[in-house]
C-alpha cells in the first residue's frame, strides 16, 4: 500500500467515525412518535420535494415493504401526503405537508441553535474558520459519493474503486 493510499484510508476511517458520532449526537430526541427511520424519510422528502414510495425505499436502501407501515403512520400523523402520480396512475407520490415542513423546520432550528452554542463556546475563531472550510470539503465529498456504490468508494485501488 502506498503512503497516499494509507493516508486516504486513515482519513476515510477517521471521517466515517467522526461523522457517525456527530450525526448521532445531532439527532433530535424522539418526540411526537418520530423515530430515526421516520426522520430519515421526512428529511429525504424535504430535499427531494416528492418521490414515489419505490424511489424513496431505493434511496433509503430498504425494501418497499419495510416502509409501507412507516408511510401510513407519517400520513396519519400529518407529516406526509400522498397523491396520484401525474403520468402513471398506478403510482403515487409522497411529499411533506405544509405542517410537516413546519414541524421539520422547527426541529432542525432547535438543533442548529444548540450546535451553534457549542461551536461558539468550544471553538476559537480560527477553528470556526477551519470548520467552515471543512464543511465545503464535506459537501464536496457527499456530492462525489452521491450515486456511487459503497463498494466502489470503499475499495480504493481495486477494480471499480477510486484512485488518487
Image: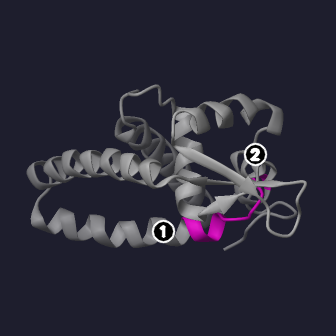
- Give left or right: position of 157 versus 12: right
Camera-nearest label, 1 or 2: 2
Q: How is the image coloured?
A: one colour
Residue 23 appears in which quarter of the rendering? top left
Instruction: List x then y, in percent, for residue 131.
Output: 28, 64
Residue 9 inside the magenta-drawn segment = no
111 left or right of 72 in image: left
Secondary element under disc 2, as helix, strand or loop, is: helix
Vertical relation: 81 (above or below) 1 = above
Residue in the foreground of this view, choosing between 82 and 60: 82
Q: Which residues make up the magenta segment?
A: 142-151
Q: CA distance from mark 1 to mark 2?
A: 23 Å
Give residue 139's mark.
Answer: 1
Which residue: 33% across, 73% down? Answer: 133
Query: Which residue does the image show at 20% across and 45% down from the upper left?
Result: 114
In screen coordinates, is 136 left or right of 117? Answer: right
Q: Judge whether residue 45 can be spotted in this image.
A: yes
The residue to which callout 2 is attached is 57
Q: Is residue 66 above or below residue 143?
A: above
Residue beneath the point at 42% across and 38% down = 21
The dominant secondary structure in magenta is helix
Can I make out residue 63 in this image? no
Amino acid at each position: 500500500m502506498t503512503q497516499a493510499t494509507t493516508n486516504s484510508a486513515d482519513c476515510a476511517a477517521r471521517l466515517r467515525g467522526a461523522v457517525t458520532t456527530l450525526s448521532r449526537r445531532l439527532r433530535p430526541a424522539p418526540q411526537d412518535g418520530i423515530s430515526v427511520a421516520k426522520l430519515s424519510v421526512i428529511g429525504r422528502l424535504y430535499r427531494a420535494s416528492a418521490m414515489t414510495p419505490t424511489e424513496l425505499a431505493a434511496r433509503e436502501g430498504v425494501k418497499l415493504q419495510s416502509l409501507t407501515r412507516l408511510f401510513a403512520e407519517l400520513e396519519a400523523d400529518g407529516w406526509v401526503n400522498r397523491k396520484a402520480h401525474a403520468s402513471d396512475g398506478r403510482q403515487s407520490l409522497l411529499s411533506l405537508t405544509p405542517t410537516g415542513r413546519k414541524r421539520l423546520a422547527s426541529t432542525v432550528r432547535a438543533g442548529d441553535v444548540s450546535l451553534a452554542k457549542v461551536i461558539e463556546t468550544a471553538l476559537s475563531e480560527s477553528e470556526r474558520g477551519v470548520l467552515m472550510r471543512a464543511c465545503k470539503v464535506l459537501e464536496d465529498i457527499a456530492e462525489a459519493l452521491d450515486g456511487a456504490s459503497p463498494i466502489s468508494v470503499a475499495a480504493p485501488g481495486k477494480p471499480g474503486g477510486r484512485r488518487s
